[in-house]
Image (tube, rainbow, N blue to C red):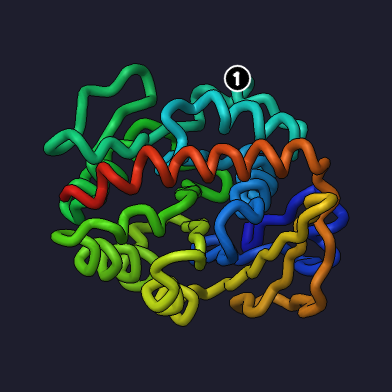
Amino acid sequence: MRTIKTDQPWFNRLLPEGLLIGSSTLISGPGGSGKPLIGDTLAAAWLRQGGSVIFMSLQYPSPDFVYASMKNVAGLDLNDYQDRIAFIALDATIEDMEAPEGRRFRANVVKPAVWDAALARATAMVPQEGPGVLVFGSAINLLLFSPTYGRAILDKIKATMTTEKQGRTYLFSASTTAKREEIAELEAIAENLLMTRSEKEPFRLFLQVLRAKDVPFVGEEIEVPIPPGVLLEVKAVADHSRKRVIPQVSRL
């Protein structure tokens, strides 16, 4: 397998051959614009084609929302793929990592050393089959609010996306509402760059591909056919995460 394709016509219109396996993708755009839902589409395709997915849940206190959004957006029940998924939940109040509960564990991935250790642990939990391992990290901009580790974790994320891939494929989403200059650094080095924006009343999500490594793409902007109710739920979760996670990270 060279590329991963989705079964969503709207996505295939922009990327008819899919995205290159082993590459790094950044979905960038304003906060609450539905970026994780684009990632859900790719993660679902990855699982359906025999790969494993590590969900780095930075803004979600539990994986329940991930299960619900995967089902609503991609029609995929994660319960059918339990042996090929792992969850890393951000906990900025602990020193390192907690013991796993099944294939789930909490980790203070604001710290670069813990970031590496958490990814290594999660990778060891899942099989290396099909297209391999996809790391899907949403709202990675939250890590940048740490006054102590902000610059260091940004550099670590950049290295992960370029020189320290460890055989994995990376899919990250980041809000440009805050830390815009830092996110621009990630946009500059991502091999695949997807941009989102949203409109209100009714809430609508738009997607554009600005760059894709070694595959053809269409650069026009399209509207993503996701129900407004699902988009509003994502926005509500994003608003909650800012109120809950950013104060914790800001104390590190």
What amino acid type is highlighted by mark number 1? Asn
Residue in the picture at 44% in, 73% down: 180
Q: Viewed as shown, does residue 112 lie left or right of 66?
A: left
Image coordinates for residue 53, horizontal then vertical, percent: 50, 40
Q: Quick one: 157 or 129, which is closer to the camera? A: 157
Asked if residue 218 is positioned above or below residue 101 in the image, the reply reads below
Helix, strand or loop at disc 1?
A: helix
Asked if residue 168 is positioned above or below residue 102 in the image, the reply reads below
Image coordinates for residue 80, horizontal then vertical, percent: 63, 21
Image coordinates for residue 218, horizontal then vertical, percent: 80, 77
Question: Can residue 46 be seen from the camera position used here?
Answer: no
Q: Quick one: 2 or 199, which is closer to the camera? A: 199
Residue under label 1, please give it: 79
Q: Quick one: 179 or 23, which is closer to the camera? A: 179
Residue in the picture at 26% in, 70% down: 155
Q: Quadrant of the N terminus?
A: bottom right
Q: Viewed as shown, does residue 76 lie left or right of 16?
A: left
Residue in the picture at 74% in, 78% down: 216
